[in-house]
Image: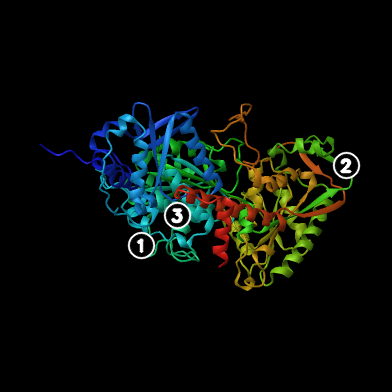
């Protein structure tokens, strides 16, 4: 008689973590005859949510959900909260949840077996399958929890992701920043539960690019795809994966190489601007470990010029989307639909989507701007606001037939400027307002020059249209701020020349006026002043503009003399542009949570798909009318968005959160845990000693 197949071979396992549970916890605990009562990857519907349980064990009166965690504990409040809400939903549906982490299986195998048997013994039917005296072996498991995402040794289908299998357990996570490691941990726990679409809100300066690279290496099996909204960010990821580029993520991080002793992945970067996609062969795509592209190149999948036309659903198993606040784009959604089994990470510095719609993913980690400031990765924001002395200001609109229409009051202007196309050809009839702000810019720039010498601080302006931009640049130059402007209508060579003159230390420009040119993905830390001279219809667009200069300067000449907490990004603006709410939103961001598709309020209404988003067409021009703005003199209000007291308060909150999570892990592993307050005192005493 042929012996029965052991449980860890008879029951399907899709990852090494699942195999470890079956091999070293379940198999010693129960007899093989329990097999038909165990269902891998069981779907559980709770209200409008669908969860996937790693292993469901159902008796006559008891349903047990086995949840496997790649890491020992969750590292962030949002990840911790998501996990608890998920577990509460399972409890509501009548499931008893029992969790095992990778490290618990590896280091405390006997206790894990005992806990599983204890739960099974509660159900009369399941109790009959228990092994009275379990024979427990020492697990053969690599120390790094990232190895848990490797394929199961029992996998019979074609081996996948040979490159990623060779590099995953050799990742040097010590070279990453704390926030990047925490995000990676939260993602590991999330993906280990079978969930597929995660989002991380990472402040400017937190290092989204390095996180994107690390997640590809950690979670991809066969092939990863990085999708960006444009060529700037595409180029950023191309450089990050280029092992020969200075400052690449693979080997060029300050803390050391991310993949020490490992060869780099095969990377293929594609963009329609570099040539038609039709010349790219499927064989070329399949040779790549990582494909970097932008959403313009994805297409609908029904044309040979489309990248999706050449790729089959199983070709990509991990997707990274950067600047995910615009992830409503149909091209992104088509990619998710084309690769239905791929896990995905949506990243953004902004917690509000550009179109106002909710984030269609589970937000498992948030690293706020105030956190980035507190950790010395981002400059603090110093707001200088010009407020008119009079309550109402007079504006004039000139129609093409020569007639004029007077517009009185701020509200009337705000109603007018909702139409981006009407703003494209605007020139301020009176340049008083520009000169008023320029005097403030000159004074603030002098302060920055004194503080940051020998680093040359730069100024980034935004404008309503090309003629307005030219006017701002001319007046800035008059105020001893050498300035030029950038516009899409310029030739590539002229754009490159202006950028070089602005970005190079030897360049002659200290200011640039941009019209949707230096946007997403453009980070230039010498920018220490941003001057929005136009309204912004969405917070996301405004936040993207000011974020271009928010990263702290790391110049060698400043080390030991100018600390990160002494660096500021000055935001100088006119109250008439209606930006006060956007500034207030930045202040309140620490207490706000992103709206997700799973948590819509009853009265929420999606913007019409036919409505064009304001600010999405940078080359729009108007045939009529032209608007001329007349500003009055006023006063300058000055304040710091996150003052020192607020930052210290946030540091204390984060310390409390970290201690609470450590206590949760401690309490779960200790029969008689001490009280939380006593635990905190013990930990702090240990750190002091």
Q: Which quadrant holds the N terminus? A: top left
* Mark 3: secondary structure: helix
- Give how far across and how far down residue 219 sits, in percent: 40, 49
| Picture residue at 40% right of the left edge, 61% below the top | 259
Mark 2 to mark 3 CA distance (whole Å) = 53 Å
User: Residue 637 placed where, x, y %?
Assistant: 81, 53
Q: Nearer the viewer, mark 1 or mark 2?
A: 1
Residue bearing mark 3: 214
Q: Which residue is mark 2?
A: 391
Looking at the image, can residue 617 be seen? yes
Quarter-wise, where is residue 31 in the image?
top left
Q: Are marks 2 and 3 in contact (CB under 8 Å)?
A: no
Closest to the observer, 109 or 296: 109
Q: Is residue 268 above or below residue 604?
A: below
- Mark in the foreground, 2 or 3: 3
The answer to whether any part of residue 618 appears in the image is: no
Earlier sequence position, callout 3 versus callout 1? 3
Location of residue 326 in the rendering, given as x and y in whole percent from the top left corner = 56, 41
Quadrant occupied by the C terminus: bottom right
* First in sequence: mark 2 vs mark 3: 3
Query: Relative to 263, is 247 on the left or the right?
Result: right
Give the distance between the C-alpha atoms of the residues marked 1 and 2, in whole angstroms.
65 Å
What is the secondary structure assignment of the residue under circle 2?
Answer: loop
Circle count: 3
- Which circle marks residue 262 in the picture? 1
Cα gap from disc 3 to disc 1, whole angstroms: 14 Å
For residue 308, which numbered disc appears in the image? Answer: none
Could you say whether the residue bearing mark 1 is in a helix, strand or loop? loop
Q: Position of residue 551 (x, y in %)?
A: 61, 59
């Amino acid at each position: 008689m042929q012996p029965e197949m052991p449980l860890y071979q008879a029951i399907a396992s899709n990852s090494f973590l699942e195999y470890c549970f079956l091999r070293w916890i379940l198999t010693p605990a129960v007899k093989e005859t329990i097999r038909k009562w165990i269902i891998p990857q069981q779907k559980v519907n709770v209200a409008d949510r669908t969860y996937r349980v790693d292993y469901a064990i159902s008796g006559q009166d008891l349903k047990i959900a086995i949840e496997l965690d790649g890491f020992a504990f969750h590292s962030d409040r949002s990840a911790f909260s998501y996990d608890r809400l998920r577990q509460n939903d399972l409890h509501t549906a009548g499931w008893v949840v029992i969790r095992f982490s990778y490290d618990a299986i590896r280091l405390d195998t006997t206790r894990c077996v005992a806990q599983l048997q204890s739960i099974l013994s509660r159900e009369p039917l399941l109790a009959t399958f228990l092994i009275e005296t379990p024979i427990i072996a020492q697990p053969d498991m690599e120390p790094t929890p990232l190895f848990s995402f490797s394929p199961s040794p029992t996998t019979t289908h074609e081996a996948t992701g040979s490159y990623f299998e060779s590099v995953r357990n050799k990742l040097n996570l010590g070279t990453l920043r704390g926030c990047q490691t925490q995000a990676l941990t939260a993602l590991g726990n999330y993906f280990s539960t079978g969930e597929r679409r995660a989002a991380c809100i990472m402040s400017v300066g937190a290092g989204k690019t390095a996180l994107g690279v690390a997640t590809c290496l950690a979670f991809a099996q066969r092939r990863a795809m990085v999708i960006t909204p444009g060529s700037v960010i595409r180029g950023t990821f191309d450089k990050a994966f280029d092992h020969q580029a200075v400052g690449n993520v693979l080997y060029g991080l300050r803390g050391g190489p991310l993949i020490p002793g490992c060869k780099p992945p095969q990377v293929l970067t594609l963009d329609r601007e570099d040539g038609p996609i039709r010349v790219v062969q499927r064989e070329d795509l399949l040779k790549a470990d990582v494909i970097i592209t932008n959403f313009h190149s994805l297409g609908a999948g029904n044309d040979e010029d489309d990248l999706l036309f050449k790729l089959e659903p199983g070709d990509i198993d991990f997707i990274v989307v950067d600047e995910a606040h615009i992830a409503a784009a149909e091209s992104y959604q088509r990619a998710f639909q084309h690769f239905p089994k791929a896990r995905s990470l949506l990243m953004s510095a902004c917690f509000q989507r550009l179109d106002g719609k909710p984030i269609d993913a589970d937000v498992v980690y948030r690293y706020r701007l105030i956190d980035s400031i507190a950790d010395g990765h981002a400059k603090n924001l110093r707001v200088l606001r010009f407020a008119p002395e009079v309550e109402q200001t007079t504006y004039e609109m000139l129609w093409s037939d020569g007639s004029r229409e007077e517009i009185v009051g701020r509200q009337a202007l705000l109603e007018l400027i909702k139409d981006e196309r009407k703003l494209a050809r605007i020139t301020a009839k009176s340049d008083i307002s520009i000169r008023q702000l320029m005097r403030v810019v000159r004074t603030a720039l002098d302060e920055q020059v004194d503080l940051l010498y020998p680093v040359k601080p730069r100024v980034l302006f935004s404008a309503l249209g090309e003629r307005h931009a030219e006017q701002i640049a001319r007046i800035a130059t008059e105020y001893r701020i050498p300035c030029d402007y950038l516009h899409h209508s310029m030739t590539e060579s002229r754009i490159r020349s202006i950028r070089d003159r602005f970005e190079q230390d030897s360049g002659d420009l200290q200011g640039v006026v941009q019209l949707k040119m230096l946007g997403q993905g453009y980070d230039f830390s010498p920018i220490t002043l941003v001057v929005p001279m136009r309204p912004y219809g969405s917070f996301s667009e405004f936040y993207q503009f000011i974020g271009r200069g928010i990263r702290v300067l790391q110049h060698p000449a400043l080390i030991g003399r100018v600390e990160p907490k002494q660096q500021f990004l000055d935001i100088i603006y006119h109250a008439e542009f209606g930006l006060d709410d956007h500034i207030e939103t930045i202040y309140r961001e620490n207490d706000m949570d992103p709206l997700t598709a799973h948590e819509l309020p009853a009265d929420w209404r999606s913007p019409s798909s036919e409505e064009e988003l304001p600010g999405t067409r940078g080359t729009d021009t108007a045939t009529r009318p032209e608007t001329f703005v007349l500003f009055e003199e006023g006063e300058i209000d000055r304040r710091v968005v996150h003052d020192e007291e607020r930052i210290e308060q946030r540091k204390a909150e984060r310390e409390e959160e970290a201690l609470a999570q450590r206590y949760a892990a401690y309490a779960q592993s200790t029969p008689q845990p001490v009280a939380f307050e006593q635990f905190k005192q013990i930990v702090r005493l240990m750190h002091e000693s």
